[in-house]
Every structure is written in C-alpha cells, then in structure tokens.
C-alpha cells in the first residue's frame, strides 16, 4: 500500500522569519520606516523563531527623571510593545498586519542612569486570531529585569476566518 499523507502526519509549520528577505527587511528597514522607533534609536539585537530582542541605547533625550537620569517609563513601554510585535512577526507563517490588543507592563525597578535598555519577547501561543506574548526589559542581566510584560496582538488573518463578515 502506498504511503500518503494521513491525518496523523503533522504538516511542518512554516515561519516568516525563515525567509531571508524578512531578516533583511526587519533589520534594515523596519525601524527606519517608523518615526517613533527611529527617534528612540531602537535597534534589532536578534531575531529567531517566536522570539526577538531589541535595544535602545542611552540618550539624554530619553530621560524622564532629570534628577537621577532614569529613562522614562514610556520609552520602556514603547520598547516592549515593539519587541512584542516583532516576536509576533517571528511566529507568523507569512506577512500579515498585526495590532496591539492589550499590553500590560509591570515596572519592577528604575532603570540605571546612563545605561541603555534591552527587551526580549517571546510569542508563546499563536492562534488564528491572536498572538500571546511575554517579555522582559533589562539592562545588564535578563534575569534581573527592569520591567516585565504580557501582551496580545490581533492577527489580520482573523478576518479570513470562515463565517466572518467584513
């Protein structure tokens, strides 16, 4: 009997990040096209399946507490939203629009004065309609975070679901 595709055989999942063009576009052009991210100096540190790490180098213009030189909480929030979005893209099978549905950031301690900040995020669950993200922002040690977050991102593919009327 010939062997065919049975329902018990799993189809290998595809990832947008495996496309060489995605890596080029995300590292070269993604932030260059978003004025807010460009203004913050956001940089891609690494991208892999379901995960992303971004960095914002320290700059005086990002200080929220002038007396202590601490980076403004809004900068950290923007960083975590952006890295969460990229972790979503790194989990998708193909390019599609996404939007932040919910973002909760817990500020655990002040960022140290004069140092940049990094954020790492992971898409730990991807459904047809929503991506679920968790992440941390840190300066010197990922295990000693400045902030943590959980987020959900809407997938544009949700409008393609059967029975959904536009």
Image (cartoon, helix red, strand yellow):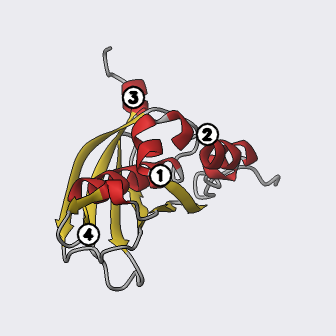
Foreground mark, 3 or 2, reads 2
Secondary element under disc 3, as helix, strand or loop, is loop
The residue most toward the right is 2
Task: Measure the C-alpha gap from mark 4 to mark 3.
Answer: 48 Å
Q: Which mark is residue 29?
A: 2
Q: Where does label 4 land, which residue?
A: 69
- Among numbered discs 4 and 1, the one appearing first in the sequence: 1
Foreground mark, 1 or 3, reads 1
Percent position (x, y) of residue 8? 58, 58
Task: Please tell me which residue lies in front, 42 or 2.
Answer: 42
- Among numbered discs 2 and 1, the one appearing first in the sequence: 2
Cβ atoms under marks 3 and 2 closer than 8 Å: no
Task: Measure the C-alpha gap from mark 3 to mark 2.
Answer: 30 Å
Q: Which mark is residue 161?
A: 3
* Point 43% across, 64% down: residue: 122
Q: Which mark is residue 41?
A: 1
Foreground mark, 4 or 2, reads 4
**Residue 116, quarter of the rendered image:** bottom left
């Amino acid at each position: 009997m010939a062997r065919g595709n049975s329902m018990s055989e799993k189809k290998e999942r595809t990832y947008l990040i495996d496309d060489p063009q995605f890596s080029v576009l995300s590292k070269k052009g993604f932030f260059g096209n978003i004025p807010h991210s460009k203004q913050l100096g956001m940089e891609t540190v690494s991208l892999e399946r379901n995960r992303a790490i971004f960095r914002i180098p320290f700059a005086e213009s990002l200080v929220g507490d002038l007396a202590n030189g601490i980076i403004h909480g809004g900068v950290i929030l923007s960083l975590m939203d952006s890295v969460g979005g990229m972790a979503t893209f790194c989990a998708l099978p193909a390019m599609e629009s996404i939007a932040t549905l919910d973002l909760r950031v817990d500020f655990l301690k002040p960022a140290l004065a004069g140092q940049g900040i990094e954020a790492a995020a992971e898409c730990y669950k991807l459904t047809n309609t929503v991506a679920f993200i968790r992440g941390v922002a840190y300066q010197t040690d990922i295990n000693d975070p400045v902030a943590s977050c959980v987020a959900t991102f809407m997938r544009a593919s949700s409008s393609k679901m059967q029975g959904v009327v536009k």
